[in-house]
Image (tube, helix red, strand yellow):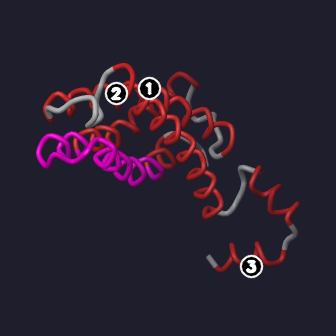
Amino acid sequence: MRELIRFLRTNDLKTILAALHSRDVHPVIQFFKYGVCGVAALVVHTSIFFLLSRFVIPALDSNVADDEVRANHALINSGIAFLFSNTTAYLLNVAWVFTTGRHSRVKEFLLFTVVNGPGAISGFLVQDWLIRSIGWPTWAAFAGFVLPNVLVNFACRKLFIFKK
């Protein structure tokens, strides 16, 4: 961390921005970039989830009164949103964070998705439990989807899929 602070203090904005665009950066900067990609994927996931929940497969409290139906619809919407957010996360990570080449692109994407699976599945289960068992509003239960993904994905992707 001291190294990062020293880097930020001793360099101008142009050098710092160049470092952000480089793949060969301090692990803290790499994690920051990974986080930005994750936030972008989360925006995609959240947007698709709530649009589906509002207009296509009703899952919001105002659309569905029954918690069982709401939970089932929320799972379907989360699954569909996952397809888009996972693809977004992969493309951004390849473009900005990690170095490809350990595997073919198809295998790399499949591994990326498989590694994303445990975080997504645990998120689906937490969200479902919060709606079905506790009766939380869909928007609040959606937060239960996010945390497991963040905790699992960075380490697994860094260790098993990409070179750096």
In the rendered structure, which disc, 2 or 3, sits on the residue that comes first in sequence? 3
Is the residue 120 above or below the residue 106 in the image? below
Query: Which residue does the image show at 79% across and 78% down from the upper left?
Result: 9
Q: Is residue 145 left or right of residue 125?
A: right
- The structure residue drawn at horizontal position 39% and vertical position 22%, both measured from the top left corner, is 55
> What amino acid is labelled 1 in the image?
Leu
Q: Residues within 10 Å of mark 2 (few under 14, many from 20)?
A: many
Q: Identify the mark at residue 24; answer none if there is no mark.
A: none
Please check the rendered image and state whether residue 55 is part of the magenta-colored stretch, yes or no.
no
The majority secondary structure of the magenta stretch comes to helix
Q: Which residue is mark 2?
A: 77
Secondary structure, mark 2, is: helix
The residue singled out by tag 1 in the image is 83
In the image, 106 versus 13, the foreground residue is: 13
Q: Where's the N terminus, which quadrant?
A: bottom right
Which amino acid, by three-letter code, is at mark 2?
Answer: Asn
